Amino acid sequence: MQNVPDRNQLIGYIQHDESAALHGEGILTDLKQGQYLLRVEACEATRPGNWFHGPFKDYSQAMSYAKYLTNLGRSGIRRENALPLVWVGGSQGNSIGVIRLYQVIHPTPAISSVVAPQREGGTVMVTPAHREALRTKNPMVSAEYAGQGQQLAVPIVKAMKKHNLQLVERVPGGELIVTKH
């Protein structure tokens, strides 16, 4: 039998989990079974983390937004989602390879907010595409991504770790490869 957490426990996981830390103010929302979420991921990612775009009421709405994201390209996604190449502290930043579609399979609270600006964690040699994302001409840069895109914090990692509860599942065929830099 599954140890299903109550709504307040799930909200607490969002507020206190380091990997799902809320930046600034957000709006508490309840995700319903059947809604869709999108996630920017590395191609090799095998399971989702805590951050998503959405929720979307249907498949076509979600895939339309996924196309918008892929048209932004890696530099636009990095800028709007404030995804650094190197995190502050030195760990590797986010790889942007694919936009994946997930469906909510267990009702859960989530917090919707605006992406806060994020500093590059170190001085890195950047490509022309990264210079565009950072809006700088300097090839060696320690800069800040603007953020301001939409984000949704969902307690995916803690729900699985503490309760073996899967909140979302990947939708077969629901992914778009990001090819534009």
Image (cartoon, rainbow, N blue to C red):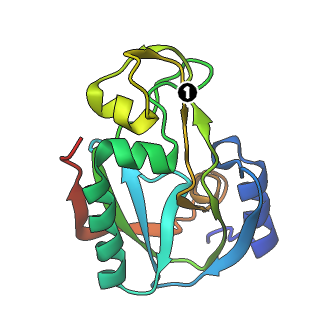
Can you tell which quarter of the image residue 56 is in?
Answer: bottom left
Q: Secondary structure at mark 1?
A: loop
Q: Position of residue 55 (x, y in %)?
A: 51, 76
Percent across and percent down for residue 91 are 52, 22
Residue drawn at 40 percent across, 68 percent down: 169
Instruction: Reply above or below: 78 against 26.
Output: above
Q: How many marks?
A: 1
Which residue position is annotated with label 1? 87
* Residue 173 placement, left or right of 112: left
What residue appears at the point 58 percent right and 52 percent down from the top-left corner?
Answer: 157
Residue 44 visible to the viewer: yes
Residue furthest front as drawn: 137
Pick whichever, 179 or 8, lies toward us.
179
Q: Is residue 150 left or right of residue 159?
A: left
**In the rendered image, which quarter is residue 74 located in?**
top left
Q: Which residue shows up at 50% across the image and 14% down it?
A: 123
- What's the residue type where badge 1 is placed? Trp
Q: Nearer the viewer, residue 163 or 51?
A: 51
Image point 48% across, 33% down: which residue? 84
Q: Give x and y (percent) for residue 40.
A: 39, 52
Name the quadrant of the C terminus: top left
Res. 94 in view = no
| Number of residues whose C-alpha sits closer than 10 Å to that of mark 1, classed few (under 14), some (14–19) or many (20 or more) | some
Q: Compare residues 76 and 5 and report the one nearer the observer.
A: 76
Image quarter in which the N terminus is found:
bottom right
| On screen, residue 78 above or below 136 | below
